[in-house]
């Protein structure tokens, strides 16, 4: 046996005290590299979670407990009064109806803006990859250049345009503006994603006689779930958290949730109620957080597939 092993060039396995073969020594789990890695991850996780902890714990406290206790201490008793007031009766300017009207205004803005901008951007990206037309690259360059123009530069022209259209101070103005400003970056994502798909599928469909819309709906869309999730998260987060467009174009009667939150926190009437402010802040950020938690894995897949290949 030993001669055969030597002639074949293979190293003999190490033997234990009882003559049994032993494998390679197992690597220890706590290596210096892993300790440093996990320490860094834990540190940054606590760094980002700490403000959330302060907000949530403060929202469950009463005002006397906030005034005379520590900001870092847990509430002595869970109290939902601040959450109820933030939703139903907190003053958001001249009215004291809480965040509930702003929530529904944000929903009315976010849903159509997200759906329309993603649908148009998907068609743009699909056409720029598979149905190239004369000047398509120039069109794409102009579209991408538009995504880098600061919003503040275009505020006054947009005010004039929405006023002439008769929608200034209405939800339709905010929906239109979010749809337009969301399309450039989403078009880039969809273009890169469709470019990464096998071109043989498109060519085979063309040979079979499928047209523009049939290929788009029956072939491209079923394969594009990850990039649609990316676009969905980007649009929902950007539109829901927007303050500038809501404050300028929505008017006083159609304020989204972020504008009402600003009015609650910066209210000059009476004594600041920090528990109500914290509860209102958490309520305002719940929708983007839920979207991220539900579709986090697909978001990473879509970014990796749609943001690399150009």
Image (cartoon, rainbow, N blue to C red):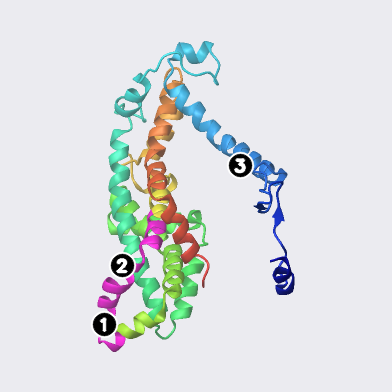
Q: Image quarter for residue 279?
A: top left
Which tag, 3 or 2, sits closer to the chain's start? 3
Q: Nearer the viewer, residue 240 or 162?
A: 240
Q: Image quarter for residue 207?
A: bottom left
Residue at which label 1 appears: 211
Examine the structure image and report whether residue 10 is included in the region drawn in magenta.
no
Can you give x and y, in whole percent of width and height, for residue 88 in the image? Answer: 29, 27
Q: Secondary structure at mark 3?
A: helix
Q: Secondary structure at mark 1?
A: loop
Magenta stretch: give its range: 206-232
Residue 70 to residue 143: above or below: above
**Horizontal relation, residue 46 to residue 269: left or right:** right
Residue 271 to residue 35: above or below: above
Front label number (3 vs 1): 3
Residue at which label 2 appears: 222
Going 42% across and 45% down the picture, which residue do you hit?
241
Going 53% across and 34% down the picture, which residue do you hit?
49
User: Around disc 2, counting alpha carbons within 10 Å, would you say few (fewer than 14), some (14 to 19), or many (20 or more)?
Assistant: few
Q: Nearer the viewer, residue 224 or 60?
A: 224
Can you give x and y, in whole percent of width and height, for residue 156 in the image? Answer: 44, 55
User: Around disc 3, counting alpha carbons within 10 Å, would you say few (fewer than 14), some (14 to 19), or many (20 or more)?
Assistant: few
Check if mark 3's residue and mark 1's residue have beta carbons within 8 Å: no
Q: Nearer the viewer, residue 298 or 159?
A: 298
Residue at which label 3 appears: 41
Q: Secondary structure at mark 2?
A: helix
Number of disc labels: 3
Which tag, 1 or 2, sits closer to the chain's start? 1
- Residues at marks 1 and 2, CA–CA distance in whole angstroms: 16 Å
Q: Which mark is residue 276?
A: none
- Residues at marks 3 and 2, CA–CA distance in whole angstroms: 36 Å
- Give the main secondary structure, helix, strand or loop, of the magenta stretch: helix
Can you give x and y, in whole percent of width and height, for residue 165 in the image? Answer: 29, 59
């Amino acid at each position: 046996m030993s001669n055969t092993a030597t002639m074949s060039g293979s190293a003999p396995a190490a033997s234990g005290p009882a003559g049994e073969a032993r494998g390679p020594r197992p690597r220890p789990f706590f290596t210096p590299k892993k300790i440093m890695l996990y320490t860094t991850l834990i540190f940054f996780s606590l760094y980002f979670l700490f403000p959330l902890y302060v907000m949530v714990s403060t929202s469950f406290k009463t005002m006397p407990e906030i005034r005379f206790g520590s900001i870092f201490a847990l509430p002595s008793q869970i109290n939902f009064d601040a959450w109820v007031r933030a939703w139903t009766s907190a003053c958001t300017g001249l009215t004291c109806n809480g965040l509930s009207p702003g929530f529904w205004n944000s929903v009315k803005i976010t849903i159509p803006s997200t759906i329309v901008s993603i649908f148009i951007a998907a068609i743009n990206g699909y056409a720029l990859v598979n149905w190239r037309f004369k000047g398509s690259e120039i069109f794409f360059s102009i579209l991408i250049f538009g995504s880098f123009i600061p919003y503040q530069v275009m505020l006054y022209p947009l005010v004039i345009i929405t006023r002439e259209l008769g929608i200034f101070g209405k939800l339709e103005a905010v929906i239109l503006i979010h749809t337009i400003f969301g399309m450039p970056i989403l078009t880039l994502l969809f273009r890169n994603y469709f470019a990464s798909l096998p071109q043989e599928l498109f060519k085979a469909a063309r040979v079979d006689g499928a047209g523009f819309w049939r290929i788009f709906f029956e072939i491209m869309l079923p394969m594009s779930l990850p990039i649609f999730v990316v676009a969905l998260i980007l649009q929902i987060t950007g539109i829901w958290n927007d303050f500038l467009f809501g404050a300028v174009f929505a008017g006083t009667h159609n304020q989204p949730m972020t504008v009402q939150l600003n009015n609650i926190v910066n209210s000059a009437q009476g004594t600041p109620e920090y528990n109500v402010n914290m509860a209102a802040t958490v309520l305002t950020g719940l929708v983007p957080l839920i979207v991220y938690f539900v579709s986090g894995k697909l978001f990473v897949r879509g970014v990796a597939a749609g943001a690399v290949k150009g």
